[in-house]
Image: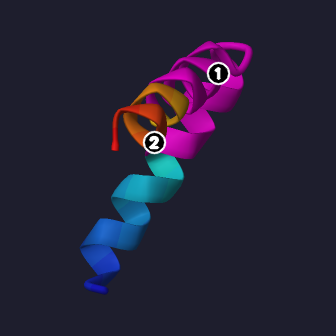
Amino acid sequence: MEPRVSVLMSIILTLERIMGGFLVSERENNTQYFLKGM
């Protein structure tokens, strides 16, 4: 992976942590729906 991508990912993870993990739980729900749909 490019360094830029990993930096972007760490920023996103930090933002999710700041927002109380709301985005994390949303993404997990979306992943579960996606896996069920496969």
Q: Chief secondary structure of the magenta span?
A: helix
Task: Specify the farthest residue to the bottom.
Answer: 1
Q: Is residue 1 above or below residue 20?
A: below
Residue at image position (41%, 64%) is 7
Where in the figure is residue 19, as x and y percent of width and height?
63, 14
Point out the tag, 2 or 1, that comes first from the N-terminus.
1
Q: Secondary structure at mark 1?
A: helix
Determine whether label 2 and label 1 are within 8 Å by CB.
no
Tell me how far mark 2 sits from mark 1, CA to CA: 15 Å
**Would you call the spot at circle 1 few (<14 residues within 10 Å), some (14-19), or many (20 or more)?**
few
Q: Secondary structure at mark 2?
A: helix
Q: Is residue 14 above or below residue 16?
A: below
Q: Quadrant of residue 22?
A: top right
Answer whether residue 26 is magenta in the image. Answer: yes
| Left-right relation of 10 to 9 | right
Considering depth in this image, is 14 or 30 the residue closer to the camera? 30
Q: Is residue 35 above or below residue 32?
A: below
Amino acid type of the residue tagged 1 in the rendering: Ser
| Left-right relation of 36 to 28 | left
| Marks 2, 1: nearer the viewer | 2
**Would you call the spot at circle 2 few (<14 residues within 10 Å), some (14-19), or many (20 or more)?**
few
Q: Which residue is mark 2?
A: 35
Considering depth in this image, is 20 or 32 the residue closer to the camera? 32
The span picked out in magenta is 12-30
| Left-right relation of 18 to 34 | right
Where in the figure is residue 38, as x and y percent of width and height?
34, 44
Q: Point out which mark residue 25 bears.
A: 1
Where in the figure is residue 6, as x and y percent of width and height?
41, 70
Q: Point out which mark residue 38 bears.
A: none
Amino acid type of the residue tagged 2 in the rendering: Leu
Residue at image position (31%, 86%) is 1
